[in-house]
Image (cartoon, grey):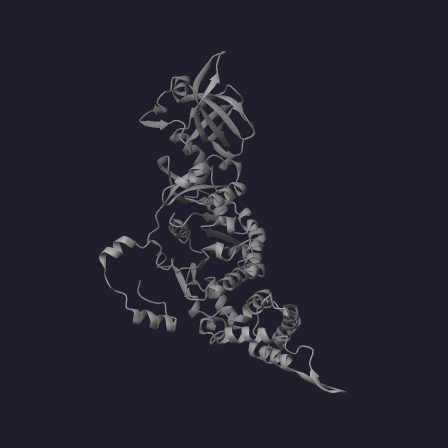
Amino acid sequence: MSQSAWDEKKIGVIREVSSTTLTVVIDPHITNLSKKIGEKIYLIGQIGSYVLVPVGKQYVIGIVSGFKKADINEQEKIVQRYIMTVTMVGSLKKGYFESGVSVPPTADMPVYVLEDKDLKVAFATYQKFNFSIGRLSLFENEQAYIDPNKFFGKHIAILGSSGAGKSCTVASILQKAVNSAETKIVVIDIHSEYKRAFPEGSRHFDIAGLELPYWLMNFEEITEMLIDPKDENAATQTATLHDLILAAKKSANQRLAESITADSPVFYDLNEVRAKIQFLDTEKITGPSGGKEGPYFGKFARFIVRLNTKMNDPRYAFIFKSRVCTDTESAKALLSMIFGLDKKSKITIMDMSGIPFDIVNTVAALIARIAFDFNFWNPNRRDLPILLVFEEAHNYLTHSGSGSKAAVRTVERIAKEGRKYGVSCMIVSQRPSEISETILSQCNSFVILRLLNPVDQAYMRRLVPDTFSGLDAAIPTLRQGEAIVLGDSMAMPLRVQIDQPSPEPDSSDINFYNQWKASYGKTDAGEVMERWWKQQRTWDM
């Protein structure tokens, strides 16, 4: 590039350098904070815009994270100048972009506008995948390209307040992913939002109508569902239940008896286990002085009530009242359906909207753990990478203990080890501060939409890289569907308007005032009560 071309792009000089940031003094002749280069006008000092600093044979790229007007001492004179803070994000070397800065600039080096063509060079490495999640907010004609291998393979967090566009963002990204022939995605859909977004190439399971039998649960999951930890006899109940379940599994599966543990996903008769527990709870033994209570007498009273309540509750029928999954062999067909191994689907949507909220924790733990264990024992795991999408994750992946301990432990293990076994997570939440820090800290890619809660904003600052500094100020003001995207799956932190999904998920807000004005009068209390009594939520949307 000619010297005159460089002079046209120059906007200031470096005044101070720290380990990650530059302080830049804007040239005094730039009074309207803009530069026209060719046919395009570039705004100077706009938060999230990019600058270029030549250092030897490479170019340091920085992102503007702060801008102000201040008094500075210039040639023993106090003058007012525009001061810009720049966070260094990477370098261009021989036409290739790399994250990090090996040779930082020094004071008095000139700083230049980063043009569209410079940005194309930075994205060149990522364009080969032809996977874009949207358009750059400050460069409307430029696509935001990412490396989908790193994006999907190293855990993702999609975070934003209610109404910021999370569901549309998730649907948009997953719709691009299902274009591949062998995609394997499982979505934990809490509010039945995603069926409409995937009319083809998907399998939709209404969990209340699907069978997820109790015998697929490991011992931790079954005890979390059936034993009250506050019961004074909880330890006795746990130890006895362990022995009875193990014995029942071995009895029902003689061929596998030598290798079976209490965690093995094999059939056993829970009614048989219940009968033995009831016997122990009421047992009386004969001694020298007559009849007396057995060692477990009365210790299972609350457990039996809890077990009977769940086994007889029609909302739990998909766990306790199996009609198809009645033997160990039936697990093969069930897991083939869930993971799309029968070639009939690329994305499996687990619709949780029809089940009791207190069981969502256990079902989420079960599906996540089955996915991990399945690929753990799969010799062809490299050919079957599975993405697990946890919608409304703050409800069951919490660090406060209010969610499911089994779910948290399972997903924490996937977050730490899943990549080795071809299982990755997409964590979707409006309250990131409530999610286990172990899980979020293992996410390598963040899609951060509008976040209004100061606690959540502070939590994010602790988790994400230093290159996020400065951009965090824009989070409360992002438009719907606009996000700050960062991680090692992209060239640099990006401010992106996420592409709209087509079709959209069923997540649009109800227009309260318009509906009040319209007064359609479509709701019939009698019909609603009949559905409520019969636990029916299926209707034409």
User: Hey, which residue is sitting farthest right in the picture?
Assistant: 288
- For the C terminus, the image quarter is bottom left
Q: Position of residue 256 (x, y in %)?
A: 62, 73
In the image, taking residue 129 as reference, residue 374 lies left or right, namely right
Q: Position of residue 143 (x, y in %)?
A: 38, 39
Q: Of 160 and 372, which appears nearest the observer?
A: 160
**Which residue is at the front of the view, 177 or 286?**
286
Q: How many marks?
A: 0
Quadrant location of the N terminus? top left
Q: Position of residue 144 (x, y in %)?
A: 40, 40
Would you place residue 384 above or below residue 140 in this image? Answer: below
| Residue 261 visible in the shown view | no
Viewer can see residue 206: yes
Position in image of residue 269 (x %, y %): 56, 77
Along the horizontal axis of the image, is 351 left or right of 399?
left
Location of residue 483 by image quarter: top left
Using the image as rendered, state which of residue 490 and residue 165 is in the foreground: 165
Looking at the image, which residue sits at the far top? 76
Residue ranking furthest to the front: 289
Picture quadrant of residue 382: bottom right
Vertical comparison of 486 with 537: above or below: above
Q: Residue at x 45, y 42 (%)?
A: 146
